[in-house]
Image (tube, rainbow, N blue to C red):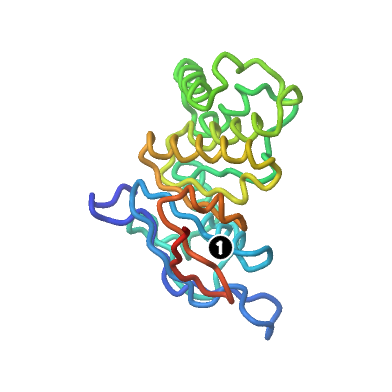
Amino acid sequence: MSGVPDTPLLVISGLTRRFRGDRPAVLEDVSLTLARGEYLAILGESGVGKSTLLNLIAGLDTADRGSIRLLGEELIGRDDDALTLVRRARMGFVFQAFHVLPYLSVGRNVALPLALQGVSSGETSERVERMLAAVGLGGQAARSPRELSGGELQRVAIARALVHRPQLVLADEPTGNLDPATAAQVLAVLRDELRASGGGGLLVTHSRAAAATADRACLLDGRTLRPITLG
């Protein structure tokens, strides 16, 4: 799944998701295009469907209608096994609640995507150390997550999301549990590492300050998506 050089990273067309019969759609005819290397923020209040959109892109939920193409290849309609392989190889995830496993060391948490891909132990160690250094946690692979602050845990999550060099990173309210100063630091790390890796990123957030760190922003409002300019 490499696509030709000018193929957009992600193209979503007419995406619609409804729940519980006749209730209004959570998402209605949503479309967006994400270029390779682009970092896009989707801004919206809680409950407007931001997480649903990410779940649809990741293949964790099923759309009622529409198309999701990653480097020109359709994801909707693929079976669970095929979507699992796409997630492992092509996507990285950063969540509001960190989802760093407390019983694994920092290094083993970051190494998880590489273990799922069967990367050798030598290469795994090298890439984990390089990624931890990039997010400001160099030399801390042996530490326990219980010893880390919230900002440090989120940087571990960013390292884990990027260590396998995914084409697409999906970030779901990654600073929602952080104070403003720490949030700004974490967002800067995410932005800088996305640019360094050449991967594309999709950030969903309710924070205009967070959205302003992206290359461009859209507003999810009333089940539709529209471009906005953040001053």
- Residue furthest to the front: 231
Q: Where 46 falls versus 14 (above or below)?
A: above
Q: Residues within 10 Å of mark 1 (few under 14, many from 20)?
A: many
52 with respect to 228 (left or right): right
Residue identified by numbered label 1: 53
Q: Position of residue 88 (x, y in %)?
A: 51, 42
Q: Position of residue 110 (x, y in %)?
A: 58, 28
The number of numbered badges drawn on the structure is 1
Q: Position of residue 108 (x, y in %)?
A: 62, 24
Q: Residue at x 45, y 66 (%)?
A: 228
Q: Residue at x 48, y 47 (%)?
A: 213
SS state under label 1:
helix
Q: Say which quarter of the image contains residue 72.
A: bottom left
From the viewer's side, name the closer residue of 203 and 180: 180
- Residue furthest to the left: 5
Q: Position of residue 182 (x, y in %)?
A: 63, 36
Amino acid type for the residue under numbered disc 1: Leu
